Image (spheres, rainbow, N blue to C red):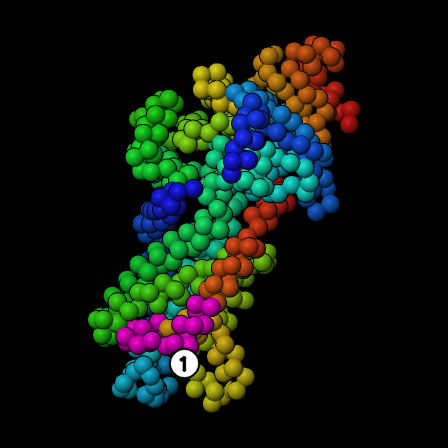
Amino acid sequence: MMNSDSNACRTSGIALRVEQVCFSYERTAALDHLSLQLAAGGFLALLGPNGAGKSTLMALLTGLLRPASGRLEIFGYDLSRQPSLAMRQLGVVFQQPTLDLDLSVEQNLRYHCALQGLSPGAAKLAISEQLQRFALDDCRQRRVRSLNGGHRRRVELARALLHSPRLLLLDEPSVGLDIQSRRELNEHVRALCLQSGVAVLWTTHLLDELLPQDQLLVLHKGRAQAQGRVAELLLQHHSDNLNGLFNKLTEAA
Amino acid sequence: MKLSQYGYCFHGILYRELLRFVQQRSRFLSSLVRPLLWLMVFAAGFRAVLGVAIIPPYETYITYEVYITPGLLGIILLFNGMQGSLSMVYDREMGSMRVLLTSPLPRAFVLVSKLLALSLVSLFQVAAFLLVAWFFEIRPPLSGYLTLIPAALLAAFMLAAMGLLLSSLIRQLENFAGVMNFVVFPLFFLSSALYPLWKLRESSEWLYTISAINPFTHAVELMRFALYGQLNLTSLCVCLGLTLVITFAAVRGFNPRRGLQQVKAGA
């Protein structure tokens, strides 16, 4: 334990480290020696067309799949060797809706707190805090079924933060939202990064969700095609807009 | 991980199952209708055909309805176990299984908690069935209801674990018709649920042998004896042993990857 703790301290500047990770379904390679790093409190956008391997990476990071080779570390904790410590640092918003539609918002959030091992008292506090943060106070007793898509996503975001994770994974969280809800979600997450120092890995295939100063990784056919700040990548590849850059990078391979 | 955290986690999983159970009243009713129909229609027809001798744990001649009651409890638990396992597959696709797996607590603990929660909820259905059965003159001793609780819980857990194991092992069973044809019906009909084993032996020795080693037979016999305040030691040992082995295999073999691949294939 001592050893792993000191190890964690040493690398606590890195929220997420993916090292040479490979994974394949049956015969098709979904991830091919993928490596990436995300600093504590940082924001990394993972951009790629459908089938690029984004969901596979998310499944690996949430323990649904195991990598064929390579290492996954969350704040220095190896996901396969110290899953409990690693998972504790992690909050997730899945691509598919995962709320229980017939239960109330509060019941859904309570369930999540219990899964995280929070005491009922701590859960109550955490729930109030997150609901307030996302302006969901009025929805507390409402059934999830009666909420619109934007609100449901906000509840999922609130849920992902209940146990104060230091790394937040968002797997195409804006899918199925209208333009305004998408913008709001984007703003929420960025504010979170700035205010609470939570590191965020955001996967998307929508270019307009990115800002010039964002760290970006373009994923294509399981490989990292480019990595760096959006503005710098544009310069590097002599593109004046993201669309052109994206097409260039994903058509080249 | 502190012990209390395990407690909170289990409580949360159980509470969610209870909430879902309360919300799905129609499912509750339909799962009661099946064994009740059996009790009223099937038993009435068969009463004349089958003569039931005095066999333990019964002390007098009994009607056929009395005989098949533990078997019908078994079918409730069997259905729930299979349905529970299927809903875990379904859950996987829908994502709430993914939420379950984000728990930092050990996966084995989370899965066993889920199975136990499903089993405890099944006991409500058992109680409801026995209540209705009471009006049909099926009246075991009151203390029998108490001794039934642990027996039914063990049986429920064993069958739920079996369902989980099946859902990881056999992909083709991911629709209910498949489970009914290849698991539920054989387990049910080749057991002591509908007719005593000695009766089965009269017609076929190998049918008897299959039924005698059928785990479902032992689940039913354990409950049958418990309902009359008696212990069937053989059945208890079989159920306990099998529960341990099956649970171990189900947790080890639990492979959520299968679910994801299906989503991929379906997408």
Task: State which region is magenta.
Answer: B223-241
The one of A130 and B251 positioned closer to us in this rendering:
B251
In this rendering, the answer to whether B237 lies above or below A184 is below
Residue drawn 57% across the image and 38% down it: A79
In this rendering, the answer to whether B256 lies above or below A31 is below
* Dot 1 alpha-carbon crowd within 10 angstroms: few under 14, some 14 to 19, many 20 or more: some
In which quarter of the view is residue B140 placed? bottom left
Instruction: Tell me which amino acid carries mark 1.
Output: Tyr
Would you name the residue on which mark 1 appears?
B195
Q: Is A122 positioned to the left or the right of A209 in the image?
A: left
Q: Is residue B134 among what the camera can see?
A: yes
Q: Is residue B175 among what the camera can see?
A: no
The one of A27 and B25 positioned closer to us in this rendering:
A27
Q: Is B186 positioned to the left or the right of B7 in the image?
A: right
Residue A145: x, y in percent? 38, 36
Residue A150 forms part of the magenta stretch: no
Residue drawn 47% across the image and 68% down it: B241
Q: In the rendered view of the protein, which quadrant contains the N terminus of chain B? A: top left
Residue drawn 78% across the image and 24% down it: A252
The one of A141 and B240 positioned closer to us in this rendering:
B240
Residue B240 forms part of the magenta stretch: yes
In this rendering, the answer to whether A41 lies above or below A163 is above
Q: In the rendered view of the protein, which quadrant contains the C terminus of chain B? A: top right
